[in-house]
Amino acid sequence: MNGTVTPRVDLLIPISRALDVSIDWLVANEYENRHHKIEEEIIKALRQVDEKKRVHIYFIVSYILKTRGAS
């Protein structure tokens, strides 16, 4: 409902058994992968703007990521 995609448990159970890892580990690892992809997209976007805008955008994004990680 809030934009968070919940993985289907019926798919995670056999995957976790095959990989011999916990479902919690799979979900946490997926979050880290998505977070890394978002960072790559931000870097690409920052390369296309001038220096002043780049610094401004960097601080905004940095603040958002820090506040989201704290909650």
Image (spheres, helix red, strand yellow):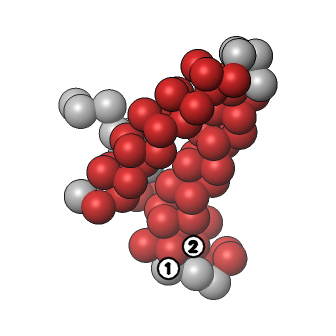
Give percent across and percent down for residue 26: 54, 67
Which residue, given by chain and number where applicable, does mark 2 sit on?
A: 16
Q: Which image quadrant: the C terminus?
A: bottom left
Q: Determine crowd level at label 1: few under 14, some 14-19, many 20+ residues with C-alpha closer than 10 A.
A: some
Kindly give the residue lying farthest to the top in the view shown: 49
Which residue, given by chain and number where applicable, does mark 1 sit on?
A: 22
Q: Is residue 53 left or right of residue 10?
A: right
Give percent across and percent down for residue 68: 33, 50
| Along the viewing direction, whichever of 71 and 32 lies nearer the viewer | 71
| Along the viewing direction, whichever of 55 and 1 lies nearer the viewer | 55
* Residue drawn at the location 43% of the way across and 34% of the way down: 60
Mark 2 residue type = Ser
* Residue drawn at the location 29% of the way across and 61% of the way down: 70
Circles 2 and 1, Cβ within 8 Å, touching? The answer is yes
Secondary structure of the residue carrying tag 2 is: helix
Q: Which image quadrant: the N terminus?
A: top left
Q: Is residue 30 visible?
A: no
Residue 25 vertical placement versus 1 (above, below): below
Q: Is residue 14 left or right of residue 47?
A: left
* Residue drawn at the location 67% of the way across and 75% of the way down: 18
* Lower sequence index among marks 2 and 1: 2
Give percent across and percent down for residue 63: 38, 44
